[in-house]
Image (cartoon, rainbow, N blue to C red):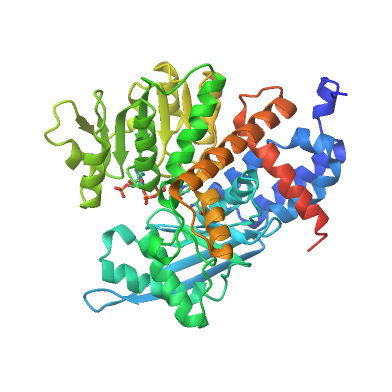
Amino acid sequence: MAPARDEGHRRPTDEVAATLREVWRDVLRRDPDQPQFRGAVREVLGSIGPVLAEHPELAEVLGRLCEPERQVVFRVPWVDDAGRARVNRGFRVQFSSALGPYKGGLRFVPGLTLDVVKFLGFEQVFKNALTGQDLGGGKGGADFAAKDASPGEVMRFCQSYATELAAHVGSWTDVPAGDMGVGPREVGWMLGQYRRLVGHDDPGALTGKPAALGGSALRPEATGYGVVYFLARMLAEQGRDLDGARVVVSGSGNVALHAMDKLVAAGATVVGCSDSRGSVAEPGGVDVEALRETKDGGGSVADYAEGRADASTSSGSVFTQECDVALPCATQNEIGPEEARRLVENGCWAVVEGANGPVTPAARTILREGKVGFGPGKAANAGGVAVSALEMQQAAGREQWSAEEVDDRLGTIMAEVHDRARDAGERYFDDPADYEHGANAAAFRRVAEAVERLGVV
Ligand code: NDP
Ligand code: 2IT
């Protein structure tokens, strides 16, 4: 029998509500200087009331879920091309191993902090749960400006970083991959140092490897492709499709460029793009191959736009442009209240997060009130880690699957991720289009049940 649809069945008991408040107080007390992490916790705690109303026994795991199992912060010394000794700070946060080995990427960008790594690690726990794979969650990286360093410097940095990382990773313990500033080249260099240190191969210890080292077909493409698979399914629920849609995509790195490829293949027009140096409007459609060539050659989106009749550059946000769909694929906090208001005014149908945390909480509220569909990153960008899990499977079975086979599995996984979020939105919030709360509720339920059954460890 379906549960009665009264307010009461959605509200946790007073005892459970008190536990929620206590966990939140502990997060504030322990890490008052970590606003990004706090925001991620708040979002999940704000989504799970109806799950706890049904399963009050899951409340006692919250304290364990909000505190990482282990946080490693370490010095990364290296020598630059001028022969100078340099030092960066490295991180690996092993957040939860309840569902399997810690899994999540490494980010090499200037200014990276423990706050950001913890926020990403916390998100990763729930994202990985949503994929249906048996993966725990973690994240790492360093405050290293990989994109400004020479190849030799990046290799020496990766080797130094991996010297510390080696003590913590392995196919059954912790399996890092790439993220911003870290792609197959860097993963290969870290694997090389890891093998040297441990004295044997472990092909499942890192994912996102170059194809020559056992990297899965389509792992580089997986996040961007997956975002568009998720988006297409979400639009289908609105009775819409991508054919003829005008889409703005931020960032022009791994996730953004592969998302653009799939958008164009689906008949959409990419009318705006950006990078860390500025944004471009091109109503006739961005030439994705030409943009990729410019970026590969070290140029900016402004360099790409030079001499293109239809293109104009700006130093402002790409999200103030008119569009039907917005895909933030660069970094956290890209869409704040101002951008969200413009998207609502411009009649945007959907905002789907290719990046992690690009839409701020205040902006999400504005989008919701403006009836703009919203696909949260922990569901929409799960394609990357999902294909990482397929890479682990291939490594364990000493197999190599074709791009077609991986794409087929990715399509199935993204459909399942979408449906899990939609179904939980319907079940717990009476709204199948509430992917944000639905994704959190579905993921929490899976992780929390595992944590509870493991006992207090
Ligand atoms: P990349 O390093 O390949 O690309 C990042 C892009 O974002 C670059 O074009 C960069 O500009 C741009 N950028 C950085 N900061 C800003 C900013 N403030 N404003 C506008 N553009 C900016 O990273 P990925 O594509 O791998 O990652 C992008 C996002 O997707 C991140 O949030 C990441 O966590 C997330 N993600 C990545 C996955 C993966 O598999 N790689 C999986 C799931 C999520 P420039 O070119 O000038 O440096
Ligand atoms: O944010 C992410 O999901 C990633 N950077 C991918 C992680 C992975 O382990 O493939």
Judge whether 339 appears above or below 347 on screen: below
Q: Residue at x 44, y 53 (%)?
A: 217
The number of discs equals 0
Along the line of sight, which residue is nearer the eye, 349 or 318? 349
Q: Residue at x 46, y 21 (%)?
A: 241
Q: Is residue 352 above or below residue 189?
A: above
Image quadrant occupied by the C terminus = bottom right
Query: Is residue 263 placed above or below 66 in the rendered structure?
Result: above
> Can residue 58 be seen here?
yes
Q: Is residue 247 left or right of residue 203?
A: left
Residue 162 versus residue 393 in the image, above or below? below
Q: In the image, residue 271 lies at what x, y percent?
A: 30, 27
The percent position of residue 152, horizontal first and vertical second, equals 27, 71
**Figure quadrant of residue 101:** bottom right
Q: Nearer the viewer, residue 365 or 185?
A: 185
Q: How far across and down, in percent of the image, does residue 245 sit?
A: 38, 21
The image quadrant of residue 320 is top left
Q: Position of residue 148 (x, y in %)?
A: 27, 60
Identify the residue at image location x=58%, y=50%: 124
Q: What residue occupies the far left of the structure in this picture?
A: 307
The N terminus, quarter of image: top right
Tell me: 8 left or right of 65: right
Visible in this render: residue 34?
Answer: no
